[in-house]
Image (spheres, rainbow, N blue to C red):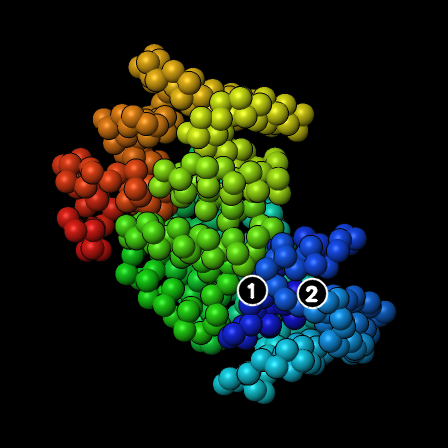
């Protein structure tokens, strides 16, 4: 993972994201198939073996087009200086690919993030838990804190802690809302601490940019994203966070492009597929939305938000039988997993309501009376039910007053084309921190 991260920092070198790269670990797949799926010309494969404090890294670089071996090497090292071994591997790869290194990369590709090997191990475990989301978010926080107890100057761990704390509120029960101010304060402090310790890191700027966007601090978020881009080539995680900010700025087409880039850089990660898919549906590109959401569903069939969005996209595209089938299989999966009964009931009611109205728009009023304001996404079906559309967006705003990009990004999406002068639109725009022209105040 550290070697992959180092290569991703080299400008002019496209490196597939971590989730997509590791997706093929242990799979007996044709290299041409892998190269095509990841959109790469070369594949690095190898192994890591440890015995006591000694480590051996074997690696080989293979050209996808003709299955030829460009380079292979084994490296022996000591875990107390594992960064040196990683540096040797990364540098050998860039030399074989004839990539021009610039600035500090001429002398260093792999930064020595910490001298404490146990802290480093805890950090990598935290990253893995964070990517899993759900209960993994709190576990990642615990692991980052444990790493920082061992090495309080571990900048990457501070950046990771900022990111995990930023998303933690989305996985907390409502009765813990009182904790939110302290969580957000700690998240910002962690990000700023990471920058103080290592001003050259891009990661804390991405995390802070996402944090500030979630708190409608639009200009602060922009500064962080600009700084992140100046420090390192944007990766999938950057584009994933940047998409939300662009959408909230009313730059819907740029948001779509950023979401597409996130998918291209990490095509086997389900979350970017979900993001790109529902943005395409906002734009009325329902067939394209289905393609992305089906790909996300294939990668994470148990992720209820992807399933919900795919049901909606099927309904919008007129694929009612596919929507019905997905509702049934998702409900069966949720029940077999022992999911919360309220969550199961919510998913069933919202998706069935969407499907009912899509099949027969004349039933809208009857179905609408059974839904809460925050579940009125059916109002965006064609023909658009304008009054309820504004009711739905207000509910998104007040679900987390002053936080989260779901409401502002939806408000400024193509769904509201033709409604930009409506007084209700302008009131919500002002509430989100913009003037009549959509410029941050």
In the depicted view, which residue is nearer to us: 155 or 319? 319
Q: Is residue 319 above or below residue 101?
A: above
What residue is disc 1 on?
157
Q: List x then y, in percent, for residue 232.
A: 47, 72
In the displayed structure, would residue 340 be above or below residue 25? Answer: above
The quadrant the C terminus occupies is bottom left
Q: Quadrant of residue 120?
A: bottom right
Name the residue nearer the viewer: 377 or 174. 377
- Mark 2 Cα within 10 Å, few/some/many (few <14, many 20+)? some
Q: Residue at x 38, y 70 (%)?
A: 227
Q: Position of residue 367 (x, y in %)?
A: 37, 15
Q: CA distance from mark 1 to mark 2?
A: 35 Å
Reading the chain from its start, which is encountered first: label 1 or label 2?
Answer: 2
Checking the image for residue 64, the label placed there is: 2
Count the numbered circles shown: 2
Q: Position of residue 258 (x, y in %)?
A: 42, 56
Residue at coordinates 35% horizontally, 13% vertically from top-left?
363
Vertical position of residue 340 compared to residue 194: above or below: above
Give the secondary structure at mark 1: helix
């Amino acid at each position: 993972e550290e070697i992959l991260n180092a290569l991703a920092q080299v400008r002019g070198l496209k490196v597939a994201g971590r989730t997509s790269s590791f997706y093929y670990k242990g799979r007996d797949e044709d290299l041409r198939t892998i190269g095509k799926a990841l959109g790469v010309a070369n594949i690095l494969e190898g192994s890591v073996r440890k015995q006591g404090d000694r480590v051996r890294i074997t690696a080989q670089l293979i050209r996808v087009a003709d299955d030829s071996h460009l380079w292979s090497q084994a490296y022996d090292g000591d875990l107390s200086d594992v960064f040196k071994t990683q540096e040797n591997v990364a540098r050998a790869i860039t030399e074989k690919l004839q990539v021009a290194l610039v600035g500090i990369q001429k002398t260093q590709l792999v930064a020595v993030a910490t001298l404490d090997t146990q802290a480093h191990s805890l950090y990598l475990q935290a990253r893995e838990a964070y990517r899993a989301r759900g209960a993994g978010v709190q576990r990642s926080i615990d692991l980052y804190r444990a790493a920082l107890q061992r090495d309080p100057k571990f900048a990457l761990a501070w950046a990771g802690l900022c990111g995990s704390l930023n998303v933690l509120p989305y996985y907390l029960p409502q009765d813990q809302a009182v904790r939110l101010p302290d969580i957000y304060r700690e998240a910002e402090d962690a990000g700023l601490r990471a920058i103080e310790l290592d001003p050259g890191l891009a990661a804390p700027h991405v995390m802070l940019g996402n944090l500030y966007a979630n708190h409608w601090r639009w200009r602060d978020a922009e500064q962080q994203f600009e700084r992140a881009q100046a420090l390192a080539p944007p990766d999938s995680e950057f584009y994933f966070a940047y998409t939300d900010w662009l959408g909230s700025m009313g730059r819907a087409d740029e948001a779509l492009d950023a979401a597409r880039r996130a998918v291209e850089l990490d095509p086997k990660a389900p979350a970017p597929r979900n993001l790109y898919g529902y943005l395409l549906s906002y734009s009325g590109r329902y067939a394209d939305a289905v393609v992305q959401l089906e790909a996300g569903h294939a990668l994470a069939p148990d992720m209820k938000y992807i399933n919900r969005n795919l049901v909606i996209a099927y309904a919008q595209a007129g694929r009612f039988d596919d929507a019905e089938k997905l509702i049934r299989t998702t409900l069966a999966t949720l029940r077999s997993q022992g999911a919360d009964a309220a969550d199961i009931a919510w998913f069933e009611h919202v998706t069935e309501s969407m499907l009912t109205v899509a099949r027969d728009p004349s039933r809208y009023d009857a179905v609408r009376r059974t839904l809460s304001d925050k579940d009125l996404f059916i109002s965006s079906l064609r023909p658009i039910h304008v009054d309820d559309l504004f009711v739905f967006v207000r509910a998104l705003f007040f679900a987390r007053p002053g936080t989260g990009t779901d409401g502002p990004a939806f408000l400024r999406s193509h769904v509201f084309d033709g409604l930009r002068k409506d007084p209700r639109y302008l009131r919500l725009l002002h509430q989100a921190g913009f003037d009549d022209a959509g410029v941050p105040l």
